[in-house]
Amino acid sequence: MDVAVIGAAMTPFGARSAWLDDLLATAALDCLADAEVSTGTVDHLYVSNMASGEFEGTTGVMNALAADIGVMPAYTQRVGQTSASGGAGLYAAWQSIASGASEMTLLVGGEKMTHRSTGDSSDIIASLTHPVEYSHGVTLPSFAGLTARRYLDRFDVPRESLAEVAVKNHTNALDNPDAQFHKAIDTEDVLTSPMVADPLRLYDYCPVTDGSAALLFCPVSVAEQYTDEFVRLSGVAGASDTHVVHERAEPTWMDAVAESGRQAFEMADCEPADIDIAELHDMVTLLEPLQLEALGFADRGKGWQWAVEGRTLPSGELPVNTSGGLKARGHPLGATGVAQAVEIYRQLLGAAGGRQVDAERGLTCNVGGFGNCVTTAILEAAQ
Amino acid sequence: MTEQPTAFLAHECENGHLTYPAHTRCPECGQPQTGTIDLSDRAGEVLTWTTVSASPTGVREPNTLAIVEFAVDNRTVRAIGSTTADVDVGDAVRPVYVEQLRDPDASFRATGRQSWDGYRFEPVE
């Protein structure tokens, strides 16, 4: 059964006073309003979230949301796949519609993080690591530092090229009213910001963020009853890689990105050259070129050239992270994979405002851990 | 903290694949791991490193970490660990036992969940 997306919404990302339940409810109701669908129509409700219990001592967030917004007796499920929870939610929503189990599925992703110190947030996220990693104080940013040094050395990559990713994504976010940062930066800002995990600095990394995003799914046959303007989820696939990061044959190659991308392209019957726009998981600048390579857009070891040559600018051949990406839109863990698809949905329907590009087919890639689990999705304009 | 120091062992399946740490089944072939190889008395080579300037609570700061590759017969196995000094890519290092790598009481993970001792990497002169 062909699966459609007929509504999208997100809260502004950033430091928010609202707790997770309010953020989720706001995005959920805004999404239903966007699609002009009533709460009583929802058969399944999925909530993508990494760590509400750890961040704010709240569990069972999917049931709480169902009751709060009045979608009972809808089936509810929390989808947890660390920072790829949102992408995993896309997959769960697709499964629910494609299987015929649901005719209207609401997916809401969200996380509330900023009330915790950066050190505490970092430790909560690092709890996904193996004990032999955790005991040494390994964090996700430290995996990025280890991998960046290898990438720069092995492929003779100029350090400044990674800064270009941050500069681009900050510039893109200027036109996104929901983004966390509305501040242009230059390469000098990146290269003189405080060191976090040598050779990577503060402005190479995404911030800590609160926020929520939502999408509404149904069969294409049902979508046509509601609207002429919808998007097809034509490909979605997930894959996993080693839990222990140093066990990968080559640290700079993201196997789960490659595998999930291969399956998503096959399902959507298209190839990288057919993609007009992409939202990639730039938790750190390095990950944008690594995903361009693993997804088959760029040659191995050459992904860094795309930002340098302007090929990923909104005016380039493959605009990447027009939303600002995780770097500047922000990264509320469970919301991110959903927010990536919200951006593609809006771009495909011509509803992206000042950051609008010409696109008929878009791709999202949502990465959990440091490539431990990944979901890639392909969306297409219905017409 | 454990009473017996945690060993620094690579684990080997019946097909000769090596991993550190151990797995219930070999990630490469799915067979049980039946053998061990002590890495604590071997030198390895630094594959890559980073120095973390913003550590989680209970972790030293700055914290230099390295991925180190050990040669075992005609095979290799890698391990991650913190270092006792600055290192560079290609440097030879050897494991040095440390009773407590980070403060378990200040860490998010439950203290009984895992060992907190282990091996740092020390440059070989």
Image: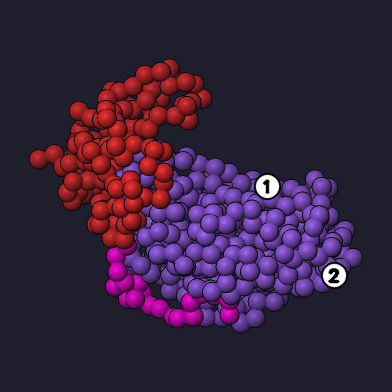
Chain colours: A purple, B red
Residue A102 % position (x, y): 81, 51
Q: Nearer the viewer, residue A333 or A293?
A: A333
**What is the magenta range?**
A177-197
Q: Nearer the viewer, residue B34 or B69?
A: B34
Q: Is residue A339 above or below residue B124?
A: below
Task: Report the front residue among A170 and B81.
Answer: B81
Residue at the spot 45% in from the left edge and 58% down from the top edge:
A287
Percent position of residue B53, x then y: 28, 60
Instruction: Pinpoint residue A308: horizontal percent, then vertical percent.
Output: 42, 69
State whether residue A135 is above or below residue A279: above
The residue where tag 1 is placed is: A266
Task: Give the structural element (helix, strand or loop) at label 1.
Answer: helix
Q: Position of residue B96 (x, y in %)?
A: 19, 36
Taking the magenta stretch, the answer to whether it contains residue A179 is: yes
Who's the residue at 87% across and 64% down the image? A224
Quarter of the C terminus of chain A within the rendering:
bottom right
Q: Chain of mark 1?
A: A
The amino acid marked with disc number 2 is: Thr
> In the rendering, which numbered label is found on residue A227?
2
